[in-house]
Structure formats: structure tokens, C-alpha cells
Image (cartoon, coloured by chain):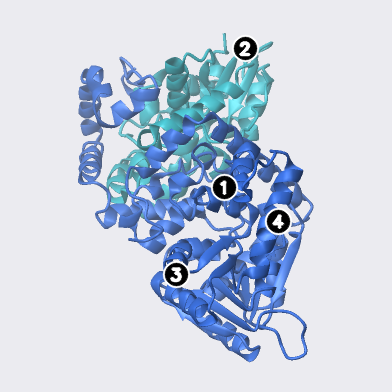
């Protein structure tokens, strides 16, 4: 079982719930629309955005096409700065390493800043069972943690929550009622999170990028929480997907110019932090130890393959805001970790098609994601490739494969086409009773087949 | 001697919307072309291709290769079938590309003047995704509708898919229908919602009928050849 699994039927089940929830629908429409417009305006300010996208794509693919070497370079540079790299082959290895660091530190409290990889490996659960309390410090993630839910939008994790929801959750921690106005909410959250920053023995962050030439970990936030998490606790652990490397600081700047613009419409996020090694002698702050967990978990298998471009992703979330399907379903339908078209590609790639067989089909293949992707990942083409993989590897249902084969045999000759469509016309009154006709007919009138085909006129 | 075009009706055109194909043919004739209908045509294989069934898709797509020649342009009243035939089919079956045109792009490129049957009509145009993003055809259908006298009513989010998406429409029928509802709601002020894709047409019209939406959904060829009444 993996955190990325999404069994057949789950997508549709969750989608139905979300469609029936008027508040969620309004929140999704508002948040995605605002973020999309922000990106479009910010891209316009870039001048030649196409050229920059090409450069970012090239910079990312250069690393991915030679991933082993870049991981080695990054690790060597990190060691030279006094940090400790650890390449985790699996989610389990990654969890075990982080838990071990916490144990050796004697930690009971870990402050976390937003990390999708930590969701991917189920880190919070592992820490809890080892007696370490993880506290999310990204405000949206903190709210979701209090609610016992998973993030549904990579940039705006709690978009489905109202001020009243948040007031109730924060009020429980405060032990008193918190008014649902922004100032009171912020004050309560700030008080609660400050305690965590100051008391945590270990700080856990993700990594937006790792820079090979310097061994730096780049952290991008708007709340500054990653900076506190990576500098106040005695030990800092960054968990990073193996593919999140850029070769040079120059490449980093290309990616950073696109990241915040694509995510929120900002030129830069409020805080862009480069962590280069732990505290050195004579420095007044920073952690005593810096560990970087470099997570493989299926990534290296994609190198050199048909789906390798997926590894170029910089997790900006732009695709979510343009996806007409995500806009209706929200993130949870895609599973607990990665959502939208990127999740629909990445989850089956990392976890295996059998683990998430419906996700490649959770798209109308409209291509809006490909158009919005700042690093030019052909997401809808990758979805199409995965659909072909579902068929080739026999994950698609036997019924579906049989139906397509029979259909294609009939329609491989004009005569077969004529006969089969004449029969279909006779059988038309029954079409709404079974299979695809029934699914169609649930929401739409079935299209009547014309009395005379065009070719018969 | 007028030049000839080969008309690709598409399966949906042939079976469900033959009137739209008749309208497409008459627009082409009006524009001065001789319209040939290759009788051996069946389907481009797109339903199987987009679901990942490449062998099945190849089997059906070969009918296209057998039916059409490279001697005259192929014109089709379907944005997504034009995309399939122009972009994906050659690689799928391993053949040289064909000159495939979506109807409005062809008519517009030929400088066709549609009759002014839509004077005083307020029409909304729905971009089908393949046509917009793969073929990058956005202006020709709008220009033609404008030349037919219509006033174009902008949709609030022209970038959003209507929810058809081939088998997506039956794999995720609830999401698919909800997407259609948004598209129909955006066209509430128009006299009709016009689309150049039989897939979108079937989906949007079916949804409007089932959900009791007053929005009329019309194929572009029909809107141009007969006007929206």
C-alpha cells in the first residue's frame, strides 16, 4: 500500500460529493480563477515568456537526463558544506531515516514546513508512531492538520475552508472562542505556531530546488515559516524529491522567475531562502545539523523512459488553476497527495498503474494543463500515453478491451460499419439501460441516431 | 473547373448530425468547390485512440487511409476529428500526413463569404479543446459568424472544456455534466451556442435537454448555412 494509491471508483465517489457541495464549488471557482489570472498577468510582464519556458524546460531536462551524476554532484557539494545527504530508495527508507534523526536528537516535537514529498512518504504518521509530534507550520497545512485532512491544492492547501471553519479549529487549540475575522485568526495562528517554532528540536522542510554547484536547498514560501523551521530548531531535515535538482544558481534563477509567477502571480514569493550547509563556526544562527533526504521512490525508473518529462515538474500548481476537471472535483478526488492533471500522471507513474487505474482517465484531455505548464511538460500527452499503458499491461478492464476490439473489427470495413450502425439504430431504445449508454443517459439526453445516415442521402 | 475537396463526414456527423454535414457540403459548394464524398470512409479511430486502445484505433484509422487520397484537401466539420486525422493518425498507422482542414479554417482561408443569415442574432461560440489548442483555430469560426451578420457574445471562460472528452463523458458522467452546465450557463444571454465539434454538440445539447436549459446548441455549419432562427 502506498500513500499515492487511489483505487478505481474513488475519484468518481469523491467527485460526486464535491459536486453536491455548493461551498466547495464556489471556493474552487474563486481560488482557481484568481490564481490563474494572477499567473496570466505575471507571465505577460515577463516579455518573452516562451523563451523562458524553453530555457526552464531545458535546464530541468538536462538534470533529469543525467540524474545520477547530478545527485552525486549535489551530495558532494552538500557534504563539502557540512551537510548530510541521504539517498532513500523507497518511502520506507526515507521515513526510517527521518525518524532516526529525530530519535538521535531526542526530539518530541518536529516543526514542519510545507512538503509534498513528506505527504508522499506518509511522514507525519511515522513520526507520530515514533513519539514525535509533527506540527505543520504553513498556515493552510496547519489548518488541515487540525481538521485531520490532506491538502487539496498544492499552493492553497485549504481553499475549501471558510473563515468560520478556521475559527472553530483554532478555537479548539486556544481553548476559547476565536472570532472569525482575519486579524483574530492570524493572531491565534501566530501564537500557536510561534510556540512550535521555538520548542521544536527538529525542523522538517521540503525543498523547492536543490542546487548541484553549491549543495544549497532552496525554499520558497510566502509566510516565512520555512525560514524559521530551517533555522530555529537544532536539526534541520529537508526532504526532497530526487528530481528537484538544478545544475547551477543561474538555472535556479530561470526556474524561480517562473515558479512564483506561475503559482500565485508574484514576481518572487515573499521568502526565497537558500540553505547552504548547517551553521558554521562563528555564525550566530542556523541549525547544528543539516540532513537532506533525497527521495527516489520510483523516480529513477522514469529517467530515459517515455514519461521522463514528468520529472521536470516544479510543483507550481498552475495546471490546477486551469484544469476544468479539478475545478469541479477539488484535489481530494485524485488521492491524498498530488492532485489535478499532474497528480493524475505522477501518482500512477510512481505508485504503479494498478494502484491508481482511474487517474489517467480523470481528464477530458483538453490540454489546458500543457498550455499553462511553465516548464512545458506535455501533461495531456502523458495522460494519453498512460491510457495506452493501461491497455497494454492489461490493467484496463477486460470488458472495455473486448468492447473496443469488437467495435474496431466492425468498423475496420465500410460494410461492417453499415451493418453495425444499422443494428445500433434498431437497438437504440435499449441504449440507455446498460454500460456507457446508461452513464451518458444519467445526465444527458441520448443522441438519436439519424433515420438516414449522411452517406445514404 | 472548380477545385475539388474531399468531405470527411466523421462518424458522429454521419450517424447523429447528418444535417450538419449537408450544411458543411453546401457551404463548400457555395465557396466554389466541388465536394467529393469518398464512400469508403468510416471513422478516424479517435474514440479508441483517446482511450489508449491503440490497436483498435489503428484498425479503424486504416479505413481513413484507404478512403482518402492526397490529391485534394480533406475538409471535415469537426475540430477534434481534424486534429486526429492531421496530427495523430499518420504516426498511428505509419503513413505520410494528409492535408486535413477543419471546415471553418478552410472556408476562412479561402475567403468564403457566408450568407448574411444571422443579422441581429447574438451568438456565443464554444471553442472545442482540440481545435483551440492542437490546431490553434480560434478566429476563423468567429470571423465567419461575424461575416454572417451575427453579434458574438463572449463566454465568461472560453478556455474551459465543455466536459465531453470522449469516453471521459461516460467514465466521469457527473463531472462531465457539471462542466456542461457551466458552459451552458455562460451562454444564457445568447440566441444560440455554436460549436464546430459534433462531440461538444452532442454533449451540450444532450445536457441542455436533460437539465431543462433553454440554451440552443447549434453546429457551426448549420449556423452559417441556414442561419440561427
Q: How far apart are marks 2 and 4 (CA)?
A: 68 Å
- Which of B185 and A28 lies nearest the eye of the viewer? A28
- Which of B158 and A248 lies nearest the eye of the viewer? A248
Residue B75, percent from left and from top? 48, 34
Q: Nearer the viewer, mark 3 or mark 2?
A: 3
Mark 2 surroundings: few (<14), some (14-19) or many (≥20) residues within 10 A: some
For the question of whether residue B136 can be seen, the reply is no
Mark 1 surroundings: few (<14), some (14-19) or many (≥20) residues within 10 A: many
Q: Distance between the residues labelled 3 and 1?
A: 22 Å
In the picture shown, does residue A244 fall above or below B13? below
Among the chains pictured, the one given cyan colouring is B
Labels 3 and 2 touching (C-beta < 8 A):
no
For the question of whether residue A257 can be seen, the reply is yes
**Residue corresponding to mark 1:** A320
Mark 3 surroundings: few (<14), some (14-19) or many (≥20) residues within 10 A: many
- Residue at (39, 24) in percent of width and height: A443
Q: Disc 1 or 4, which lies upstream in sequence?
A: 4
Q: Disc 4 or 3, which lies upstream in sequence?
A: 4
Among the chains pictured, the one given blue colouring is A
Whether labels 1 and 4 share one chain: yes
* Circle number at residue A191: 4
Amino acid at each position: 500500500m502506498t500513500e499515492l494509491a487511489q483505487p478505481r471508483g474513488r475519484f468518481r465517489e469523491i467527485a460526486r460529493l464535491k459536486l453536491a457541495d455548493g461551498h466547495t464549488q464556489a471556493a474552487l471557482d474563486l481560488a482557481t480563477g484568481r490564481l490563474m489570472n494572477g499567473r496570466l498577468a505575471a507571465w505577460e510582464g515577463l516579455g518573452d515568456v516562451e523563451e523562458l519556458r524553453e530555457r526552464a524546460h531545458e535546464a530541468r531536462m538536462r538534470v533529469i537526463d543525467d540524474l545520477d551524476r547530478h545527485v552525486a554532484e549535489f551530495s558532494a557539494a552538500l557534504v563539502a558544506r557540512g551537510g548530510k545527504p541521504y539517498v532513500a530508495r523507497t518511502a520506507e527508507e526515507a521515513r526510517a531515516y527521518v525518524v532516526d534523526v529525530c530519535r538521535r536528537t531526542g526530539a518530541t516535537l518536529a516543526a514542519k514546513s510545507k512538503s509534498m514529498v513528506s505527504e508522499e512518504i506518509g511522514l507525519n504518521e511515522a513520526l507520530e508512531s515514533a513519539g514525535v509530534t509533527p506540527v505543520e507550520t504553513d498556515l493552510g497545512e496547519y489548518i488541515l492538520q487540525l481538521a485531520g485532512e490532506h491538502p487539496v491544492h498544492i499552493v492553497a492547501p485549504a481553499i475549501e475552508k471558510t473563515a468560520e471553519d478556521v475559527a472553530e479549529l483554532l478555537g479548539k487549540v486556544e481553548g476559547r472562542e476565536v472570532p472569525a475575522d482575519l486579524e483574530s485568526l492570524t493572531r491565534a495562528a501566530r501564537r500557536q505556531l510561534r510556540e512550535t517554532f521555538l520548542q521544536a528540536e527538529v525542523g522538517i522542510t521540503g525543498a523547492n530546488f536543490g542546487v548541484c554547484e553549491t549543495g544549497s536547498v532552496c525554499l520558497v514560501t510566502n509566510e516565512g515559516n520555512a525560514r524559521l523551521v530551517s533555522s530555529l530548531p537544532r536539526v534541520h531535515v529537508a526532504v526532497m524529491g530526487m528530481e528537484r535538482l538544478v545544475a547551477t544558481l543561474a538555472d535556479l534563477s530561470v526556474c524561480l522567475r517562473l515558479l512564483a509567477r506561475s503559482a500565485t502571480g508574484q514576481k518572487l514569493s515573499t521568502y526565497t531562502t537558500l540553505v547552504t550547509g548547517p551553521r558554521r563556526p562563528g555564525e550566530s544562527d542556523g541549525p547544528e545539523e543539516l540532513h537532506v533526504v533525497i527521495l527516489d521512490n520510483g523516480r529513477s525508473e522514469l529517467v530515459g523512459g517515455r514519461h521522463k518529462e514528468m520529472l521536470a515538474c516544479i510543483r507550481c500548481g498552475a495546471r490546477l488553476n486551469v484544469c476544468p476537471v479539478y475545478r469541479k472535483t477539488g484535489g481530494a478526488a485524485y488521492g491524498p497527495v498530488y492532485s489535478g492533471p499532474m497528480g493524475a500522471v505522477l501518482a500512477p507513474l510512481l505508485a504503479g498503474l494498478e494502484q491508481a487505474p482511474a487517474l489517467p482517465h480523470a481528464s477530458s484531455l483538453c490540454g489546458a494543463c500543457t498550455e499553462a505548464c511553465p516548464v512545458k511538460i506535455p501533461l495531456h500527452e502523458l495522460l494519453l500515453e498512460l491510457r495506452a499503458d493501461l491497455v497494454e499491461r492489461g490493467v484496463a478492464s477486460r470488458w472495455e478491451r473486448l468492447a473496443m476490439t469488437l467495435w474496431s473489427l466492425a468498423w475496420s470495413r465500410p460494410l461492417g460499419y453499415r451493418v453495425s450502425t444499422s443494428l445500433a439504430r434498431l437497438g437504440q431504445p435499449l441504449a440507455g439501460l446498460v454500460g456507457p449508454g446508461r452513464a451518458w443517459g444519467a445526465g444527458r439526453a441520448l443522441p438519436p441516431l439519424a433515420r438516414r445516415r449522411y452517406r445514404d442521402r | 473547373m472548380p477545385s475539388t475537396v474531399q468531405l470527411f463526414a466523421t462518424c458522429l456527423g454521419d450517424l447523429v448530425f447528418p444535417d450538419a454535414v449537408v450544411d458543411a457540403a453546401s457551404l463548400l459548394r457555395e465557396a466554389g468547390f466541388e465536394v467529393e464524398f469518398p464512400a469508403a470512409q468510416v471513422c478516424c479511430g479517435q474514440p479508441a485512440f483517446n482511450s489508449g486502445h491503440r490497436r483498435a484505433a489503428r484498425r479503424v484509422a486504416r479505413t481513413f487511409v484507404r478512403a482518402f487520397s492526397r490529391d485534394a484537401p480533406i475538409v471535415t466539420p469537426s475540430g477534434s476529428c481534424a486534429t486526429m486525422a492531421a496530427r495523430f493518425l499518420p504516426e498511428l498507422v505509419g503513413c505520410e500526413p494528409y492535408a486535413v482542414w477543419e471546415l471553418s479554417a478552410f472556408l476562412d482561408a479561402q475567403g468564403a463569404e457566408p450568407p448574411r443569415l444571422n443579422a441581429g442574432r447574438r451568438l456565443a461560440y464554444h471553442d472545442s479543446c482540440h481545435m483551440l489548442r492542437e490546431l490553434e483555430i480560434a478566429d476563423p469560426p468567429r470571423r465567419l459568424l461575424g461575416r454572417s451578420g451575427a453579434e458574438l457574445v463572449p463566454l465568461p471562460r472560453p478556455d474551459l472544456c465543455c466536459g465531453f472528452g470522449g469516453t471521459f463523458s461516460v467514465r466521469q458522467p457527473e463531472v462531465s455534466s457539471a462542466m456542461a452546465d457551466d458552459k451552458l450557463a455562460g451562454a444564457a444571454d445568447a440566441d444560440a451556442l455554436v460549436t464546430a465539434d459534433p462531440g461538444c454538440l452532442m454533449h451540450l445539447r444532450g445536457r441542455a435537454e436533460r437539465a431543462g436549459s433553454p440554451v440552443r446548441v447549434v453546429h457551426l455549419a448549420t449556423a452559417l448555412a441556414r442561419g440561427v432562427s
